[in-house]
Image: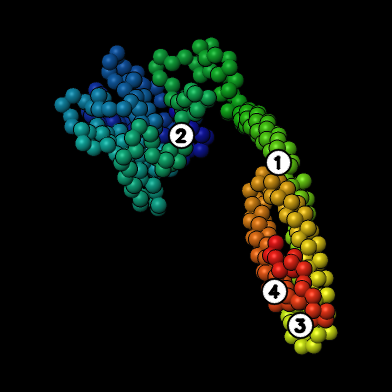
């Protein structure tokens, strides 16, 4: 039995079988709208084969070539709708086709040939016939055909849960079930995503806590920068002392020499104070260096500070050497003629 809509153009008007099972050439024209076509005959006369032929065209079942009539090479089944649309199924050892004729005029039709469709029905043929298998969960129902031994549609042999799903599908309420299932899936996915994000947040917070020492280290680095700035100021003072020494060296008269000697002593005193201050700064820098070794980010700053220390030591050494050289030149006081103290000649 075929149930495929109320419109006359969608009704199967005729079916033709060629070399399909026991049928050599059979043509059936069904009764019109409001009438019933009954096929009668003795057992094994081919009545059920007609239903199988319709199933073969509409659902591409059964597969294989076992239905080809013995002694024949090709089996063909064609159905024609009231609209003039015609679908033909052909099968042989080397040929496997669907042919579709779409009416484009009163006496014209466009032919389309389909091959390589596997076990399914070409989508164009399904759209033309408007007959599709109905999928209910994992079960596929062929609701448009009922074979000879099939029970009533949705009868007692069908589980109640399946009947409910089929009726829901026909009524359109399965959309709510699908939406509910998808909503549950989305809620579960969102819950898992929330848990994942919470775990990531905890991991990030733990990482922040593990690096809490960075902020105090930055404060120490800033203090080291200030210490380096102070050392730079002392270097400028030493440069001014060197300029003063050069000016004293250019003084020609004894009074200027005496003043130069006093300036040298004063410079040496300041240099001694600077040396003490420098030693203190070096000790502080060593402490800072010990702290900076704990952070890779501060390594470059320690290298820069060490280079500055070496430069200051070299500069102080040059100042001392210059002072010692100057004292060597002034072995006797130009005013009183007495010999200068030995500590002015030594390079400590």
- The number of callouts visible is 4
Label for residue 247?
3
Q: CA distance from mark 3 to mark 4?
A: 17 Å
Q: Is residue 285 above or below residue 325?
A: above
Q: Is residue 332 above or below residue 228?
A: below
Label for residue 211?
1
Q: Which residue is mark 2?
A: 131
* N-term-proximal mark, 4 vs 1: 1
Q: Is residue 77 above or below residue 316?
A: above
Asked whether disc 2 touches disc 1, contact meaning CB atoms under 8 Å apart, the reply is: no
Q: Is residue 237 left or right of residue 53?
A: right
Q: Position of residue 336 (x, y in %)?
A: 83, 79
Helix, strand or loop for disc 1: loop
In this view of the protein, can residue 46 be seen by the observer?
yes
Q: Position of residue 259 (x, y in %)?
A: 83, 80
Of circles 2 and 1, which is in front?
A: 1
Helix, strand or loop for disc 2: loop
Of circles 4 and 1, which is in front?
A: 4
Q: Residues within 10 Å of mark 1 (few under 14, many from 20)?
A: few
Please state, as top left, top right, bottom left or bottom right, where the N terminus lies in the image: top left
Could you say which is closer to the camera, residue 191 or residue 181? 191
Q: Is residue 261 left or right of residue 12?
A: right
């Amino acid at each position: 039995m075929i149930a495929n809509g109320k419109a006359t153009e969608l009704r199967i008007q005729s079916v033709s079988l060629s070399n399909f099972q026991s049928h050599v050439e059979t043509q059936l024209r069904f009764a019109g709208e409001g009438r019933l076509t009954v096929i009668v005959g003795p057992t094994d006369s081919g009545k059920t084969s007609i239903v199988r032929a319709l199933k073969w065209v509409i659902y591409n079942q059964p597969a294989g070539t076992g239905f080809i009539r013995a002694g024949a090479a090709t089996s063909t089944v064609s159905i024609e709708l009231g609209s003039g649309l015609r679908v033909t199924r052909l099968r042989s050892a080397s040929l496997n086709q669907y042919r579709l004729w779409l009416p484009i005029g009163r006496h014209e039709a466009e032919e389309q040939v389909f091959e390589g469709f596997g076990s399914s029905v070409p989508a164009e043929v399904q759209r033309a016939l408007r007959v599709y298998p109905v999928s209910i969960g994992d079960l596929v129902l062929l609701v448009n055909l009922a074979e000879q031994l099939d029970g009533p549609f949705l009868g007692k042999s069908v589980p109640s849960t399946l009947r409910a799903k089929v009726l829901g599908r026909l009524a359109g309420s399965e959309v709510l079930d699908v939406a509910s299932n998808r909503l549950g899936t989305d809620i579960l996915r969102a819950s898992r995503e929330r848990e994942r994000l919470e775990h990531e947040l905890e991991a990030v917070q733990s990482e922040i806590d593990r690096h809490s020492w960075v902020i105090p280290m930055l404060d120490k680095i800033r203090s080291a920068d200030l210490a380096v700035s102070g050392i730079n100021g002392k270097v400028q003072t030493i440069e001014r002392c060197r300029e003063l020494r050069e000016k004293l060296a250019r003084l020609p008269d004894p009074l200027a020499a005496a003043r130069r000697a006093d300036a040298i002593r004063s410079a040496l005193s300041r240099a001694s104070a600077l040396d003490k201050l420098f030693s203190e700064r070096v000790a502080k820098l060593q402490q800072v260096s010990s702290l900076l070794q704990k952070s890779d980010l501060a390594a470059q700053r320690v290298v820069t500070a060490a280079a500055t220390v070496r430069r200051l030591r070299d500069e102080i050494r040059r100042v001392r050497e210059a002072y010692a050289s100057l004292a060597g030149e002034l072995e006797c006081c130009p005013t009183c003629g007495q010999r200068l103290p030995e500590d002015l000649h030594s390079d400590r």
